[in-house]
Amino acid sequence: FIDADKPSNTKYFKEAKRLVKSGGVIIVDNVVRQGRVADPTLSDPAVEGIINKLDYIQNMGFDAIWISPIVENVNQTNGQGEAYHGYWPSNINNLNPHFGTTDELKSLASALHDRNMYLMVDVVVNHLVANPTNTTSVYPETFNYDTLQPFSGQSSFHPQCFISDYNNQTEVEQCWLGDTNLPLIDLDTENSTNVDIMYNWVKGLVQEYSIDGLRIDTVKHIRQDFWQGFSDAAGVYTVGEVLIGNTTYAAPYTKVLSGILDYPTYYAVFNAFTSSSLSGTSGNVSHIAEMALQAQSVYRDPFALGSFVENQDQPRIQSRTSDQALVKNALAWVFVNDGIPIVYYGQEQGYQGGEDPANREALWLSGYSTQNKPLLNQITALNAARKAAISANPKYTSTKAVFHAQSDQALAIYKPPMLTLLTSGGDGSSTDWTVPASVSSGISGNGAYAPGDTLVDVLTCDEVTVGNDGTVQAKASAGQPKVLMVKSLGQGVCQKGSS
Ligand code: ABC
Ligand code: CA
């Protein structure tokens, strides 16, 4: 599925988009470290290391991996440390040799496609980064614009100024990220030659490596109308990073990309499920519904959102709460809302790192163990449940979730055939749930439940019976989330005692 313009190939692109939606995506970031130690006998085997671990990823039910930016980066330790993560591109026409060769990257794409999995690559357009002219020199005076390829020197970049006022959108777009320790040299994306270079580059990249989707970095730092052409040139699913807590600011970007990372809801989820143990008061879950409802009303396609509770930029949830019930509720959210579930590697192992770079622990240290890993089990059950939901109800991925806040600490989410009950009371709490029939009668669809049906919690295999009037009554003990489906769908995927 290489040429998007070829009519015979169009269906494969649709297929890729559908499949990305049908299961979860795992972020295999930090790939140099990941790969290097996936197999310690290899020095820089990032890509090969991932290929060797695809069973581990696929066994959890993921359909796609998102890998770090793949192009050549600055190659020396600089004012912000080691350039291991791929976000400091220096030459967009070369691959990062630490990650692997052209052939190795192609092997990764084919290894994934052989398994019916998909390759998502992170791309950076907003900036390039130059090595200082000597190791002791200080940015920004001493770097050489000519090292930034394939651009033609200083005139290809916006004049130097660091972003200081995030309320000034022109400044956000045309000044620079970073600081004098490490300037992220801002590409002049107002310049049509540069625009053409970037559109052709992404088109070629997607084709050459059979890429199925893109995560796009620093989207709010380039004018919105740049992205439409970029997305069209890429021809695949695009999910943009618009790092912002409000939906009004984010909404226009959903018109120019397939979707965006759901940051506004992320903040609501993170706050709801981490405040409890920190402050002794319980987090408010109704704010989650508020943000999700806003997303449903102001985004072009709320079903193409990327949903997450962890990523390479944010402290891991377990750095902010040790309450495992809260952690499980937050993680469950990712799989039961309107967006595409995205899990950051290491969450399945229970990693606890705080702010960048503490949140970028190597995965090899875990030994990729699958024994006694409650979150890994939960992810596996939820990926399976979501697939069962999609096969029972083909409209699952285009049916808007309905929300019912039983209290500030108890939120029901109905998206047929899944009824999810989340609580932020923590592991010492128990909740008597009564979900009124009006919640499930608000929307219908295959797999919807009816009076008298037996529902099964896919996280525990516990059963509840729907009341004669359509009410669902259930007890959640120890602060646990519940993800209920009619028994015929849920019993095949539920995990006894995964919680
Ligand atoms: C380096 C060091 C870190 C150090 C950091 C400041 O600099 O390593 O130790 O803490 C890459 C690397 C990073 C590196 C940076 C800079 O480059 O991964 O390790 O950090 O050299 C993307 C990527 C990210 C990547 C880059 C650069 C961009 O996901 O991994 O970083 O290619 C801004 C950008 C966003 C960017 C993020 C890191 O910075 O917009 O694209 N992420 C406000 C602003 C946001 C801003 C955010 C953080 O602060 O509005 O635009 O993100 O600075 C909400 C508000 C938001 C607010 C948040 C904090 O609160 O609604 O507006 O965000 O409530
Ligand atoms: Ca910019």
Image (cartoon, rainbow, N blue to C red):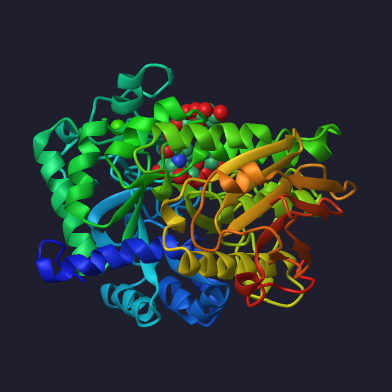
How many marks on residues?
Answer: 0
> Which residue appears at 58% of the width and 31% of the height?
290
Q: Quadrant of the N terminus?
A: bottom left
In the rendered image, which quarter is residue 348 located in?
bottom right
Residue 380 coordinates in the image, percent (x, y): 62, 70
Residue 101 coordinates in the image, percent (x, y): 30, 73
Foreground residue among 38 and 378: 378
Residue 77 coordinates in the image, percent (x, y): 46, 50
From the viewer's perspective, tell me whether residue 85 is left or right of residue 140.
Answer: right
Foreground residue among 194 and 59: 59
Looking at the image, the residue that sits furthest to the front is: 468
Judge whether 42 appears above or below 3 on screen: below
From the viewer's perspective, tell me whether residue 126 is left or right of residue 80.
Answer: left
From the viewer's perspective, tell me whether residue 67 is left or right of residue 353.
Answer: left
From the viewer's perspective, tell me whether residue 400 is left or right of residue 203.
Answer: right
Q: Is residue 146 visible?
A: no
In the rendered image, which quarter is residue 442 located in?
top right
Foreground residue among 106 and 310: 310
Foreground residue among 85 and 240: 240
Q: Quadrant of the C terminus?
A: bottom right
In the rendered image, which quarter is residue 256 located in?
top left
Residue 378 coordinates in the image, percent (x, y): 68, 65
> Which residue appears at 31% of the width and 27% of the height?
173
Q: Is residue 438 visible?
A: yes
